[in-house]
Amino acid sequence: GAGVSQSPSNKVTEKGKDVELRCDPISGHTALYWYRQSLGQGLEFLIYFQGNSAPDKSGLPSDRFSAERTGGSVSTLTIQRTQQEDSAVYLCASSRGGGPSVDTQYFGPGTRLTVL
Amino acid sequence: QKEVEQDPGPLSVPEGAIVSLNCTYSNSAFQYFMWYRQYSRKGPELLMYTYSSGNKEDGRFTAQVDKSSKYISLFIRDSQPSDSATYLCAMSADTGFQKLVFGTGTRLLVSP
């Protein structure tokens, strides 16, 4: 079966532009996560969705960052007025969600964002 | 100070060597411990997870957790060139929602 897919795989933009990053989770996975991986840094949690709701968006670094999820499936991460420090790989993961046991997160290949 | 510390490497070993990868952490609430492997330009994939202290073995991989020392390890026996990747430790205090806190990753290079 298909894994988590993300698009675009690479995005180069100019400072000040808005960008949208897309994530298609594994079919049937109710939980979806966004992480950011900067050079020399570990994965940094951004936001978590359970269904279409985001009970934890504590990792979003500023109000320029927003995310939504529709139909309990596809999610979009939007960065407005991009800055050079936003350059990073943005990773999406999904999991079955909702259970008390360890819930394996499956990652997509990421979107490499470069802000010039 | 970061919640999870991990030596970035690179760690270079010859094929067949035993590899030891480690992380230390500061949050005593962490109870789930995971190791992810990430190949270049790919997303991380889960290798192993353990709950609380103890050892867990899966083939050539062994994960150890020492909660009293806040120290976790991943051992790779008979390392292969295909093991060359970045290894990330991750931890969580949550039982349902796995809000993972990651280390920076250790880059491993296994030479033939």
Image (spheres, rainbow, N blue to C red):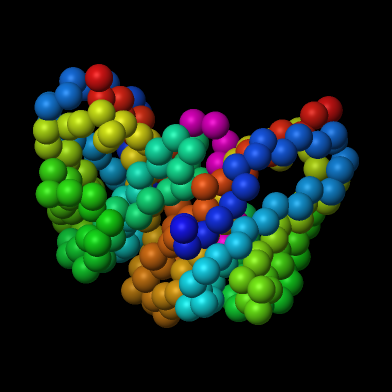
Q: Tell which of B5 and A91 is nearer to you.
A: B5
Residue at image point 72% right, 34% down: B109
**Which image quadrant for residue B62?**
bottom right
Position of B102 relative to B8 (above/below): below
Quadrant (top left, top right, bottom left, bottom right) of the C terminus of chain B: top right
Position of B35 relative to B78 (above/below): below
Position of A4 relative to B70 (above/below): above
Q: Is residue A25 visible?
A: no
Q: Tell which of A28 and A110 is nearer to you.
A: A110
- Horizontal and vertical percent for residue B101? 45, 60
Magenta segment: B34-41
Position of B108 relative to A61 (above/below): above
- Horizontal and vertical percent for residue A22? 24, 39
Q: Tell which of A15 and B16 is nearer to you.
A: A15
**Which image quadrant for residue B51?**
bottom right
**Residue B36 on the magenta segment:** yes
* Residue situated furthest front in the rendering: B1
Residue at image point 35% right, 34% down: A88
- Horizontal and vertical percent for residue A94? 37, 55
Residue at image point 43% right, 48% down: A43
User: Does residue A88 appear left or right of residue B56 in this picture?
Assistant: left
